Amino acid sequence: MSFYDTGLKFSCRECCYCCAGEPGFVFLEEKDVKAISDFLKIGEKEFIACYTRPVVYNNYTTLSLKEKSNNRCVFLTSKGCAIYPVRPIQCSTYPFWPHLMESLDAWKEEKAYCPGLDSGELHIKEEIETKLKLMKDRILIKL
Ligand code: SF4
Ligand code: SF4
């Protein structure tokens, strides 16, 4: 039994907090790099040079999307995410991340940051678990 057995409601309110509110990391897998490079019609090396930065996480160096000086993700525009159809797994699976699915308390605490939780579209358990697995199986790039 888990607290999300009957599903959870979530719809993004497009407040942009998670794309711009605080400094943070948007980690990338190889498949993210390929999908975004293809979408932008540029080579992977060019994508990495222009849009990513090396960061240290869990004692190794990996890639994160760049942030502008005001903490905004490099792909956040006035019309929203410029790479929305191929946004990184980390973005497309939110808020069904492992640490938020551990307990109802963790889910409730996240509501302080995201106004989309517990409102809007109902996401069934199977969908939540598919997204959870994508995050659990992530293999981040090691530089
Ligand atoms: S914090 Fe929540 S509501 Fe705001 S942009 Fe992010 S996912 Fe959408
Ligand atoms: S890639 Fe798109 S969804 Fe992800 S943080 Fe950047 S602007 Fe937001």
Image (cartoon, rainbow, N blue to C red):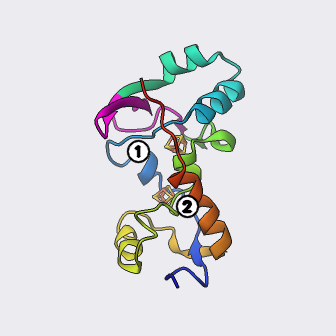
Q: Looking at the rendering, which quadrant does residue 114 occupy?
A: bottom left
Are circles 2 and 1 on residues that touch, CB within 8 Å? no
Q: Looking at the rendering, which quadrant does residue 9 occupy?
A: bottom right
Circle 2 — which element?
A: helix
**Residue 23 vs residue 5: left or right?**
left
Residue holding disc 1: 20
Q: Residues within 10 Å of mark 1 (few under 14, many from 20)?
A: some
**Residue 59 vs residue 99: left or right?**
left
On the question of residue 33 being in view, the answer is: yes
Q: Residues within 10 Å of mark 2 (few under 14, many from 20)?
A: many
| Amino acid found under the numbered disc labelled 2 | Leu
Circle 1 — which element?
A: helix
Q: Which mark is residue 126?
A: none
Q: Say if 141 sits above or below 58 in the image.
A: above
Span highlighted in magenta in the image:
55-77
Residue holding disc 2: 132
Q: Is mark 2 within 8 Å of ligand 1?
A: no
Q: Residue at x 41, y 23 (%)?
A: 143
> Where residue 127 appears, x then y in whole percent?
66, 67
Q: Earlier in the sequence, mark 2 or mark 1?
A: 1
Question: Is label 2 or label 1 in front?
Answer: 2
